[in-house]
Amino acid sequence: MTVLAHWSVPLIMLLFAYGLAARTLPAYSPGLASVAYAAAGVVGALLLLVSLVVHETAHALVARRAGVPVWDMTLWVLGGVTRMGRPATARTAFAVAVSGPLASLLLGGIAIGAAIGVHTTLGWRLPVAVLGWLGGTNVLLGVFNLLPAAPLDGGRVLQAALWWRTGDRERAQRAAGRAGQLVGVILAAVGWLAFVRGVTGGLWLVVIALAVAGAAAAERRWAQLALALRGVRVAEAMSSPVVAGPDWLTVDRFLSGAAARTRHSVLPLLDFEGRPSGVVRLSRLAAVPSEQQQALAVRDLATPVSQCTLAAPDELLTAVLERLGTGGGLPVLVMDGGRLDGIVTADDIQRLYRRHATRENPGTAAQGGAGRRGFAA
């Protein structure tokens, strides 16, 4: 399993280390050298980073034990995001969701207990300050993540509970997304009021709240999409026959040949043996200076097939969409026995969404659809 880090993680770790070294540690254990505070601050920030990994690992271990595939984890300021398959039952979804906050609360209790032990037996104030801060931060992280707001773990817990009660996963996810937007707005208002009253930390709460609200809106869009496309197979969504181009052609010949015969903005490529070798965006080819188009091969600008999302014609479309990001995202290359059978683009998904959404609710299509903002063409 791949472990990734959001761009905010190094910045937050640096701010935590600075805050510890400049304010928290000197206030609790005065009179020490600056280098001691700096070293302890770095250690505290690194221990917090380890805590984030433990939080996400708890999700991954519980998921794998329940037979749910886990693809990767991305750390960020609120803990992280572990991308995995959809749990088969509400009970499994609940166990996976609650495992992360419980791990953080357990780590917080251990760190606080260790701080009390060191203070009682050794009296070393600097380690006590680091451990106490680490414990309190983990407890705060665990409690915050239990807020009933998707995409926080508490939102997943709420979704699992609603799923168990109603038997409808997508509607439960949509309700959890609405709760996430509401909680995000409330937290943003609280943070802003704190900031205007002189609490600088309120601005951080506003930023986090807006991130939560934005992610919750994406959860609602995905739930609407999944609800509309429930039971749809890849073969129903794909464009076929598909226009593909040889990957050995130069850019100028490709643009005047295969690219001129398609309505898509992304084209699959075939190698000398007729096997798919990747996909290329026409906008990227068009951006190549004219003097270089005759010397540059299309495959040099393509996304290789190893980084593309592949699917079989009989797979559920929603299951394939959940995998997006483990490879190259859209378009999806539809393979049948090693042969390229078609592609699924954002336009194909939008077309199907509108058709199925209109069938269930005639007013839905007029609202603009849920898919286009969630996927790149």
Image (tube, rainbow, N blue to C red):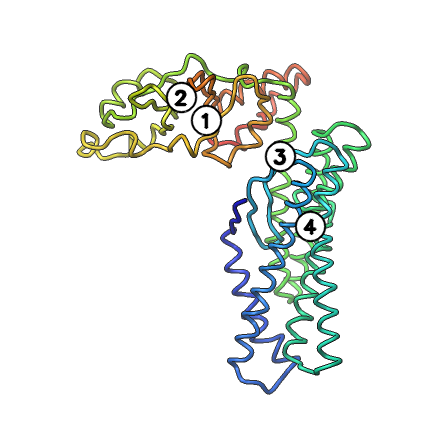
Which comes sooner in the sequence, label 1 or label 4? 4
Q: Between residues 370 and 248, which one lies in front from this camera angle? A: 248
Circle 3: element type:
loop
Asked if residue 317 lies left or right of residue 149, the reply is left
Residue under numbered circle 3:
85
Q: Which mark is residue 264?
A: 2
Residue wearing tag 4: 100
Mark 2 Cα within 10 Å, few/some/many (few <14, many 20+)?
Answer: some
Residue at numbered disc 1: 331
Answer few, some or many: residues within 10 Å of disc 1's Cα (few below 14, many 20 plus, some between 14 and 19).
Answer: many
The percent position of residue 259, horizontal first and vertical second, equals 31, 21
Please state the horizontal and vertical placement of residue 73, each as a whole percent of the image: 57, 46
29 versus 253 height, above or below: below
Q: Are marks 2 and 1 in contact (CB under 8 Å)?
A: yes
Give residue 33's position: percent from left, percent from top: 54, 84
N-terminal label among 1 and 3: 3
